[in-house]
């Protein structure tokens, strides 16, 4: 009986190293692209006034008039575009987030951007709730599974390529 010649296999350390490198690179790449998509979607929907809450709770005529007198944009959440333009993608110790820079302050009001977001998203006794963060992140929850599948597919493809193995 003839002995079978052992097949050449990648060494475990080489496999683990390749997997680790690929997982980190692919996860960061996909996460960054997804975060940029979320940021762009949020900014665009504010710009185009595409949130139901903006339609349900339009600005009061007095507010519109005050904005006109100051030469400001009369749309909801856009007076100077500072709020909308401050929505950005940030790297944190925990990963990547969409939001405002830590402690970023709105020039006109002196309030932190996160405070303004909370006021408008949840409302107060004088400002009606005009959710825009929560609806956006609810949509995103459904899309995260696809991003995870895409990461997995890319990782497997890249690891196989690096190890030059075929299924």
Image (cartoon, rainbow, N blue to C red):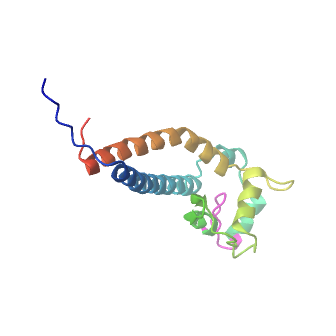
Q: Viewed as shown, does residue 111 lie left or right of 52?
A: right
The residue furthest left is: 2
Residue 36 image offset from top left, x and y in percent: 49, 57
What secondary structure is the magenta-colored segment mainly? loop
Picture quadrant where residue 4 is located: top left
Picture quadrant where residue 100 is located: bottom right
Question: Where, quadrant-wise, is the N terminus in this rendering?
Answer: top left
Residue ID at (41%, 42%): 152
Residue 30 image offset from top left, x and y in percent: 44, 52
The residue furthest front is: 1
Q: Nearer the viewer, residue 133 or 120?
A: 133
Residue 77 image offset from top left, x and y in percent: 66, 60
Q: Nearer the viewer, residue 149 or 22?
A: 22
Answer yes or no: is residue 60 visible. Answer: no
Q: How many marks?
A: 0
Picture quadrant where residue 25 is located: bottom left
Q: Which residues are magenta?
A: 69-81
| Location of residue 67 with respect to 19 vertically, above or below | below
Residue ID at (42%, 56%): 29
Q: Is residue 88 magenta?
A: no
Residue ID at (60%, 47%): 136
Answer yes or no: is residue 61 visible. Answer: yes
Q: Is residue 76 magenta?
A: yes
The residue furthest right is: 125
Question: Where, quadrant-wise, is the C terminus in this rendering?
Answer: top left
Residue 75 image offset from top left, x and y in percent: 64, 59
């Amino acid at each position: 009986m003839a002995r079978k010649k052992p097949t050449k296999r990648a060494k475990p350390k080489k496999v683990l190293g390749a997997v680790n490198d690929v997982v980190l690179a692919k996860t960061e790449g996909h996460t960054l692209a997804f975060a940029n998509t979320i940021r762009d979607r949020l900014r665009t929907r504010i710009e185009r006034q595409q949130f139901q809450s903006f339609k349900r709770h339009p600005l009061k005529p007095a507010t519109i008039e005050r904005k006109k007198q100051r030469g400001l944009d009369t749309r909801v959440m856009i007076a100077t575009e500072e709020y909308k333009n401050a929505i950005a993608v940030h790297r944190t110790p925990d990963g990547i987030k969409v939001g405002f820079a830590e402690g970023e302050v709105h020039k006109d009001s002196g309030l932190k951007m996160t405070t303004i977001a909370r006021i408008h998203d949840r409302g107060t006794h004088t400002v009606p709730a005009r959710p825009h963060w929560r609806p956006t992140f609810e949509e995103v929850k459904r899309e995260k599974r696809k991003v995870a599948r895409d990461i997995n597919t890319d990782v497997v493809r890249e690891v196989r390529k690096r190890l030059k193995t075929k299924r």
